[in-house]
Amino acid sequence: MVLCGANSYEEKYYLNPDFSSLPDSIKDELKIMCVLYVNDVGGILTLVYDEDGELCFQVRSEEFDPMFDDIGSQLKIKQIQREKQDLLEALQLYYKVFFLGEEVG
């Protein structure tokens, strides 16, 4: 399931309407994080939940895109995962509880 994403080619940001109940501060933080990522390295970034509720970063770029920085992309994702660890873990917990029906504890 897609949480959100940003596209440098169309200069668009997307938040899945299923997550509209998230606090505005979280939605804003996600938007800033995704837009800054595609602004820095290009391409398309999508945050998706896998079947176990883990939040994954999916990155795509158009074929032969000279502006896309593949190495920078990997480094930027590692930086985001480090700096936004609490946010990302909270989003995983939110998904597991409210979408997968798991018990907390």
Image (spheres, rainbow, N blue to C red):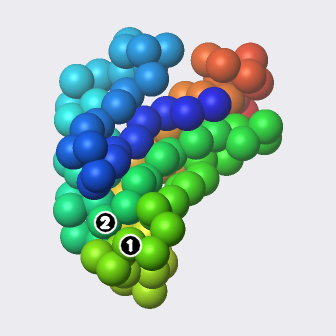
For the N terminus, the image quarter is: top right
Q: Amino acid at mark 2?
A: Gly
Instruction: Characterize the local packing of mark 1: few (<14), some (14-19) or many (20 or more) Cα atoms within 10 angstroms.
Output: few
Is the residue 67 above or below the residue 1 in the image?
below
Q: Position of residue 100 (x, y in %)?
A: 74, 22
Q: Secondary structure at mark 2?
A: loop
Is the residue 41 above or below the residue 39 in the image?
below
Q: Mark 1 near mark 2, Cβ–Cβ under 8 Å?
A: yes
Q: Position of residue 33 (x, y in %)?
A: 27, 53
- Please name the residue that numbered disc 1 is placed on: 65
Q: Position of residue 18 (x, y in %)?
A: 49, 14
Quadrant location of residue 13?
A: top left
Q: Residue at x 29, y 22 (%)?
A: 23
- Please name the residue that numbered disc 2 is placed on: 42
Quadrant location of residue 14?
A: top left
Q: Rounded to the nearest whole Å, what is the CA distance between mark 1 and mark 2?
A: 9 Å
